[in-house]
């Protein structure tokens, strides 16, 4: 119940990350948040005696809903620490306080993995990754070092946030899981608006009580993103024959080169496979007079570009290969650990001018 209020009243206003464009103020109601918590716990086997390591920022919906309110709903013990990028301290907290649940972004989880030693995470039952694409190498390394499966999920600020998640019972590594109960997902053809067949990439639309009330004082953007109760996530992906959702990248991170649509996320995923473990990357696009756009790869350390491009060429068409590599020792990031694509693109543009 809501004290002296209504379930449709705004409970919190959170801002989108702004990694691609200006942040928007998202109004989430009591119903939005409570319905998402109840749906999430129907699918993931949490217990009241679990101990949640809650070190994600509460200004980010992933931290506020999953780290805080889900744990409070169960009556779990919560171990808090305000700085998720203090990797050494976080690993020491896991060793001493022995939480059973670790939830984070791939960037944060990667930091904990690098800083930890075998046996440090023996108390953990589940490790859940969200807010950004989980690299295959991160999943593999968690299993090798700690014998732990990283379960990847998917959500948005506008959906309170969880849309889908892999679970111990239903897990397809590389996917973003099956939609949680009471959440509908459909894939629409980008050009025609028709429903896509299994494995056909299109726009990801979702419906349910977790969809936001709207953007604060912005009816135009709200009406553009919510039509007939369906929220357009701005993401591209597909459903397989088993109902698992696969993320193909943000629509904003698709670029047309020579008349063909190229996913920058796919280029990044292929590039990551051939980079040393201690090198991060971000792929951006810039205008090109002949092809319409060109792909630039940024890396945090110098790499053997010739060998990497040769390996990438076996998996990608020529138009999707980076035309240039730039070294940016510290990629711009958001408070959630996501790479700030806008700032990275601006930085690349300034370096090449």
Image: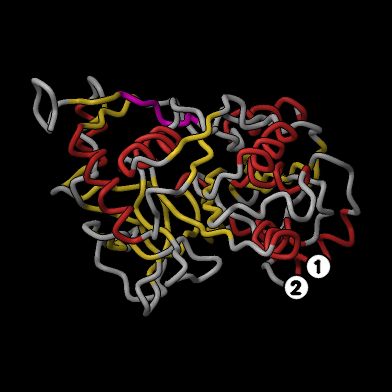
Image quadrant where residue 286 sits: top right
Residue 143 painted magenta: no
* Quarter of the rendering occupied by the N terminus: top left
Image position, residue 344 (x, y; %): 65, 32
* Residue under pointer 1: 311
Residue sitting at 76 percent across and 46 percent down? Answer: 116
Asked if residue 242 can be seen in this view, the reply is yes
Looking at the rendering, the stretch of residues picked out in magenta corresponds to 13-18
* Callouts 1 and 2 close, C-beta under 8 Å: yes
Vertically, is 184 above or below 89? below
Image position, residue 103 (x, y; %): 52, 45
User: For this view, does 141 lie left or right of residue 210?
Assistant: right
Residue sitting at 39 percent across and 60 percent down? Answer: 45
* Quarter of the rendering occupied by the C terminus: top right
User: For this view, does 331 lie left or right of residue 205?
Assistant: right
Other residues around mark 1 within 10 Å, as few (<14) / some (14–19) / many (≥20):
some
* Residue under pointer 2: 314
Colouring mode (rainbow / by chain / secondary structure / one colour): secondary structure
Image quadrant where residue 11 sits: top left
């Amino acid at each position: 119940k809501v004290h002296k209020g209504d379930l449709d009243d705004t409970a919190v206003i959170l801002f989108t990350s702004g990694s691609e464009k200006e942040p928007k103020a998202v109004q989430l109601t009591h119903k939005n948040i409570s319905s998402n918590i109840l749906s999430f716990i129907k699918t993931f086997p949490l217990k009241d005696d679990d101990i949640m390591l809650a070190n994600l920022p509460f200004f980010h919906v992933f931290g506020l809903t999953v780290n805080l309110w889900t744990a409070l709903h169960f009556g779990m013990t919560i171990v808090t620490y305000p700085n998720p990028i203090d990797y050494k301290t976080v690993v020491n907290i896991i060793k001493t306080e022995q939480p059973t649940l670790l939830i984070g972004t791939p960037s944060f989880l990667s930091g904990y993995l690098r800083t930890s030693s075998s046996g440090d995470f023996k108390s953990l039952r589940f490790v859940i990754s969200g807010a950004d694409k989980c690299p295959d190498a991160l999943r593999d390394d968690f299993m090798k070092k700690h014998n732990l499966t990283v379960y990847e999920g998917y959500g948005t600020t506008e959906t309170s946030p969880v849309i889908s998640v892999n679970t111990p019972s239903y897990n397809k590594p590389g996917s973003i899981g099956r939609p949680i109960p009471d959440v509908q997902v459909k894939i629409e053809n980008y050009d025609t608006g028709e429903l896509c067949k299994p494995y056909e990439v299109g726009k990801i639309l979702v419906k349910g009580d977790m969809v936001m009330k709207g953007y604060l004082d912005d009816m135009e953007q709200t009406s553009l993103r919510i039509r007939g109760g369906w929220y357009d996530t701005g993401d591209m992906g597909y459903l397989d024959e088993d109902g698992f959702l696969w993320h193909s990248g943000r629509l904003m991170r698709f670029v047309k080169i020579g008349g063909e649509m190229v996913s920058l996320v796919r280029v990044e995923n292929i590039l990551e496979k051939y980079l040393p473990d201690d090198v991060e990357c971000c792929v951006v696009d810039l205008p090109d007079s002949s092809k319409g756009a060109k792909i630039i790869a940024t890396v945090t350390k110098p790499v053997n570009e010739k060998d990497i491009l040769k390996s990438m060429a076996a998996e990608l068409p020529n138009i999707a290969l980076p035309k240039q590599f730039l070294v940016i020792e510290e990629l711009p990031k958001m408070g959630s650990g996501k790479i700030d694509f806008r700032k990275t693109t601006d930085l690349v543009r300034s370096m090449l001018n």
